[in-house]
Amino acid sequence: MGSIGKIHFPGAADLAGLINRHLKSKLTPVAVEAGMHLLAWLPPGINAEKIALAALKEGLILQPISQYCIKCKHANGLILGFAGFSFSQMETAILILRRVLDKP
């Protein structure tokens, strides 16, 4: 998260806060120090690949962590980007993701 004067550039902490506010029981953000993406773990029983595909149909581009792993201890998660998005755009995306996760 950075700022120039009164301009605020949302970052990982903002995205993690939105996840904790709107998706606390369905997604666990991983704290990161740098970068333009955030990792978030899904609970057991929710398939990251299926969620990413369903989210794409709603206009969100998410990447399942398993696409980048051969053997991962915690491969059931998503990679979410935040660079270039305003806080309100990130919140809209998180609310769409919540709708996707709430579908049976």
Image: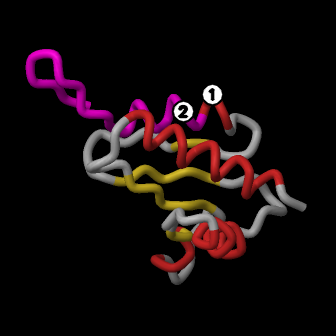
Do the numbered discs 1 and 2 sit on residues whose CB atoms are within 8 Å?
yes
* Dot 2: element: helix
Q: Position of residue 54 (x, y in %)?
A: 69, 70
Residue depicted at 44% across the width and 35% down the height: 88
Colour mapping used in the image: secondary structure
Q: Residue at image x 90%, y 61%?
A: 104
Amino acid type of the residue that numbered disc 1 sits on in the rendered structure: Arg
Indicate yes or no whether the magenta region holds residue 10. yes
* Rendered location of residue 56, percent (x, y): 58, 71
- When the figure is inspected, residue 49 is found, relative to residue 91, above or below; the finding is below
Residue shown at 64%/75% (left/top)?
53
Residue tagged 2 = 18
Q: Nearer the viewer, residue 65 or 94?
A: 94
| Residue under label 1 | 21
31 relative to 96, above or below = above
Secondary structure found at label 1: helix
Within the magenta stretch, is there residue 70? no
Q: Which residues are magenta?
A: 1-19
Q: Position of residue 90 (x, y in %)?
A: 46, 42
Quadrant for the N terminus, please.
top left
- Left or right, residue 73 beside residue 98: left
